[in-house]
Image (spheres, rainbow, N blue to C red):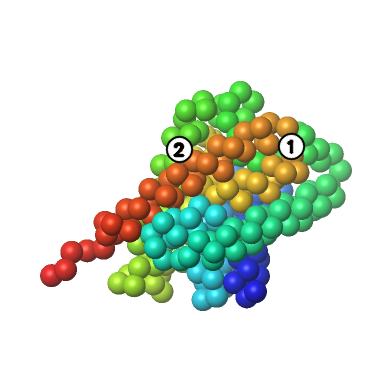
């Protein structure tokens, strides 16, 4: 239950702070500010709940850890449930706050949902969105698995992971809004509906593919230095 609660709170925080920065403060902080909101949320939660659950707060991360052989399938499913519930609650809280402002319209202003194509941010193609999400998640999970390896200086893991997520957002916000996290995409899409739901499949599948490749890389030892 402690692990479940930690992952729920952590994912809730990521969605509330990251998507919240886009919805409530995007016009003031810009793309860079939104990127740092996502990254700093991860840094905060890494040190807040890392000792309890490892602060995955992302089904793709848990999948990568599972493929790497560092957790059981049963435990991964527990993480997934907590993460999707946490993301949904985070999106609900954000919607309640955003709707408290006169003129807010979820169909116009959104809820930080992911997407691609005509009418969405940089209007990138499906192929561009797919490639970005797979590659970005792969690199993100490589950093996570490497930073949390027994031989790594784990005291700095939260910072390295958070800064990596920040860099990914700086690069990719205009492409997809940046998912690299199926739960982060699911929560807002559930409330926004429409195109957000129709395009959700990519943000469920692509991050898992990228994370699976990173997990396999770790499993076969490519993330470990050779013995002296």
Residue wearing tag 2:
132
Q: Residue at x 63, y 68 (%)?
A: 4
**Residue 183 against residue 131 in the figure, above or below:** below
Q: Residue at x 47, y 30 (%)?
A: 128
Q: Nearer the viewer, mark 2 or mark 1?
A: 1
Q: Quadrant of residue 203?
A: top right
The N terminus - image quarter: bottom right
User: Can you give x and y, in whole percent of width and height, for residue 162 in the image?
Assistant: 48, 59
Between marks 2 and 1, how big is the CA–CA gap?
A: 23 Å
Residue wearing tag 1:
193
Q: Residue at x 67, y 59 (%)?
A: 86
Secondary structure state at the residue bearing disc 1:
loop
The C terminus - image quarter: bottom left
User: Can you give x and y, in whole percent of width and height, for residue 208 in the image?
Assistant: 49, 47
Secondary structure state at the residue bearing disc 2:
helix
- Name which of mark 2 and mark 1 comes first in the sequence: 2
């Amino acid at each position: 239950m402690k692990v479940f609660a930690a992952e729920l709170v952590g994912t809730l925080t990521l969605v509330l702070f990251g998507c919240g920065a886009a919805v409530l403060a995007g016009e003031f902080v810009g793309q860079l500010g939104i990127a740092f909101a996502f990254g700093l949320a991860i840094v905060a939660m890494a040190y807040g709940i890392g000792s309890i659950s490892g602060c995955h707060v992302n089904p793709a991360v848990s999948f990568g850890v599972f493929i790497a052989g560092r957790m059981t399938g049963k435990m991964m499913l527990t993480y997934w449930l907590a993460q999707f519930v946490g993301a949904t609650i985070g999106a609900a809280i954000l919607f309640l706050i955003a709707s408290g402002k006169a003129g807010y319209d979820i169909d116009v202003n959104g809820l930080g949902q992911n997407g691609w194509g005509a009418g969405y941010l940089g209007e990138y193609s499906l192929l561009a969105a797919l490639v970005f999400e797979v590659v970005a998640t792969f690199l993100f999970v490589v950093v996570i698995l490497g930073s949390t390896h027994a031989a790594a200086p784990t005291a700095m893991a939260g910072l390295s992971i958070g800064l990596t997520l920040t860099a990914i957002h700086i690069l990719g916000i205009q492409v997809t809004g940046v998912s690299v996290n199926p739960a982060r995409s699911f929560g807002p899409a559930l409330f926004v509906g429409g195109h957000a739901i129709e395009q959700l499949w990519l943000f469920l599948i692509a991050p898992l593919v990228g994370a699976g490749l990173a997990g396999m890389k770790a499993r076969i030892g490519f993330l470990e230095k050779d013995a002296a």
